[in-house]
Amino acid sequence: MDVQWRKSSKSSDAGGSNCLELAEQGGEILMRESDNPDVVIRTTRAKLRAFLGGAKEGEFDDMA
């Protein structure tokens, strides 16, 4: 099964090497960095939703 990776249109590097990519496979959410595609992190929709909620509320702004 071929994984269909998606990245944000906000990715700042024209070459596509400065972004985080997401995909869904087998009910899991997969994440990887475009410049290191062999390292894949697997998580659930619920965990990703919780993280994104915190990011939207500014919990990680000090890291950017």
Image (spheres, rainbow, N blue to C red):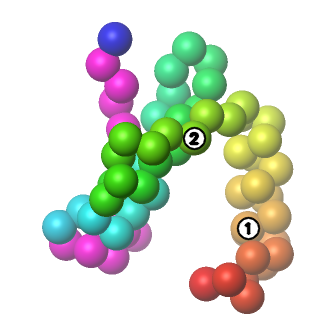
Q: Is residue 57 visible?
A: yes
Q: Nearer the viewer, residue 36 or 11?
A: 36
Q: Is residue 22 visible?
A: no
Decide if residue 40 is on the left or right side of residue 51: left
In magenta, the rendered stretch is 2-14
**Mark 2: few/some/many CA within 10 Å (<14, 14-19, 20+):** few
Q: Relative to 16, does residue 23 appear above or below in the rendering?
A: above
Residue at x 68%, y 35% (from the top left corner): 43
- Quadrant of the frame with the N terminus: top left
> What is the CA distance from the residue labelled 1 to the residue labelled 2?
18 Å
| Magenta-span inclusion, residue 13 | yes
Task: Give the labeled residue for mark 1.
Answer: 55
Residue at x 82%, y 50% (from the top left corner): 50
Task: Give the labeled residue for mark 2.
Answer: 41
Instruction: Specify the label residue 11 is tagged with.
Output: none
Q: Nearer the viewer, residue 60 or 40?
A: 40
Secondary structure, mark 2, is strand
Measuring from the top left, give residue 61's x and y in whole percent.
Answer: 71, 83
Outermost left residue: 15
**Mark 1: few/some/many CA within 10 Å (<14, 14-19, 20+):** few
| Magenta-span inclusion, residue 58 | no
Measuring from the top left, give residue 16's x and y in whole percent.
Answer: 24, 63
Measuring from the top left, give residue 18's x and y in whole percent.
Answer: 34, 69
| Amino acid under disc 2 | Ile
| Marks 1 and 2, the one that precedes in the sequence | 2
Residue at x 53%, y 35% (from the top left corner): 30
Outermost bottom residue: 62
Q: Nearer the viewer, residue 56 or 25?
A: 25
